[in-house]
Amino acid sequence: MEARSTSPIVEIIRFELEKIWSAPYVGLILMLLIIGGPTSSAPMLVEGSAFEVVLSSIGGFKILFLYLITILTFANSFGRDIEQDVLMGEFTLPVRKENIFVAKLLANLSLLLLMDLTVTLFSIWIITASISLASAASIVLVDVATLLLFIAITILMSMVLRSRFGAVIVSIAVYFFESILLDSIALAITTTNPPNLNPAYILLKLVFSGELTVFTWGIILIHIAFPLALLAFAYFFFKEVLQLD
Amino acid sequence: MINPSKLHYTGIVLLMMGLGFSILTIMRGLPTYVNVIQVGLPGNSTFPLFMPSMWSPRNVRIAIYLSSGEIDLLIFDKPNFNAFMRSGDAIPLREFKGLRGEVINFEIPARGEYYMVAKNRGALTVDGEIVLTFWGFESDLTYLSIALLVLGVAFWIYGRFLKKGS
């Protein structure tokens, strides 16, 4: 047990938690997610299911907070060490670079998802007076799928630009560019009743009701396949190209 | 042995969560929700009133405006409503008899599904409307906010106290 607790991976995760996830930061994220969740805008009396309420709240504050928090977290996690050119020297045990990449990615993603799951469960309880883990897990799964693009861009830009600020700006620019592009496409199709092309909305429809439209494949390609390719590229860039002390 | 740093950390997180819940309680508690139900009950009949069934633990003001006659109003939770619809035999959460034009106030005990049933025991049709106004802060969210704030402050102060001591 003693040997396990001092393994390099555990040490990386401990460093990550101490550096990034300070108490005011965790508290602020939870506070913003609680305030910005679907419950803040949901009516007091609800006729539909939690899924319908969550669907109707897409595009609200919660998902925007989640995007922003994710971008800032990953920019801080990867960007700070790369920007200051310190990483390997922080660890007392010999550690491989690829392990650092995976541990950082999984530790930060798991914590974000844990907080998202907690707040989603709470929202479902407020709306339906019952806790449905399956519904909450599906909503969190959709959140992961939509966040993956921004995680991949932030990590890659942190390495390529060697700047946290640059990574954040590029990721936020991609978010707004995508929103404007999707709105333009929706309006180009029809101006009378434009379809909702929000990625979270389309993926939620796919997960909950199996609705597969022509746009679903595009969103899957942009938000799942493309980010996975970017992450793979970032992994090899981190492992093979990036020089860190 | 309690780790003062962890206690301090937990205190700050709980305190900020408590603040979040307090703001959410205020955001959800300030607006009132009004639901108007038109009734036209034939003589010697019982009908469920159609309205959203998910109620949060707030205060309800029920105002009844009838053109003639009187009605009984029964409020059920979900299991009792199902039993009432099946057999007509169930225990209502609240029962108001012989209403003509009264205003009733009551507090919803817990978050959940509730149903209203109107009963006309007279021979003639009763027409009118029932206006339900939901107001006030949701009690469960209020208690949760207070509990988190108190726990957060206690952990935070105790953590700092232990830190200084060590």
Image (tube, grey):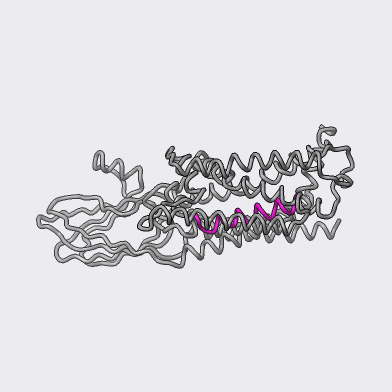
Q: In the figure, is residue B70 to the left or right of B29?
A: left
Identify the magenta region: A59-78
Residue A66 is inside the magenta segment: yes
Q: Percent x, y for residue A186? A: 44, 53
Residue furthest front in the image: A188
Report the magenta stretch's main SS: helix
Q: Quadrant of residue A229?
A: top right
Is B70 on the left or on the right of A211, as rendered?
left
Of residues A41 and B89, which is closer to you in this image? A41
Of residues B11 and A7, the one nearer the viewer is: A7
- Seen from the viewer's position, the closer of residues B75 and A65 is A65
**With respect to residue B113, does B163 lie above or below?**
below
Quadrant of residue B38 in the image? bottom left
Magenta segment includes A44:
no
Rendered-image quadrant of the N terminus of chain A: top right
Q: Position of residue A77 (x, y in %)?
A: 75, 50
> Does B148 appear above or below A209?
below
- Residue visible at 80% across and 47% down in the picture: A15
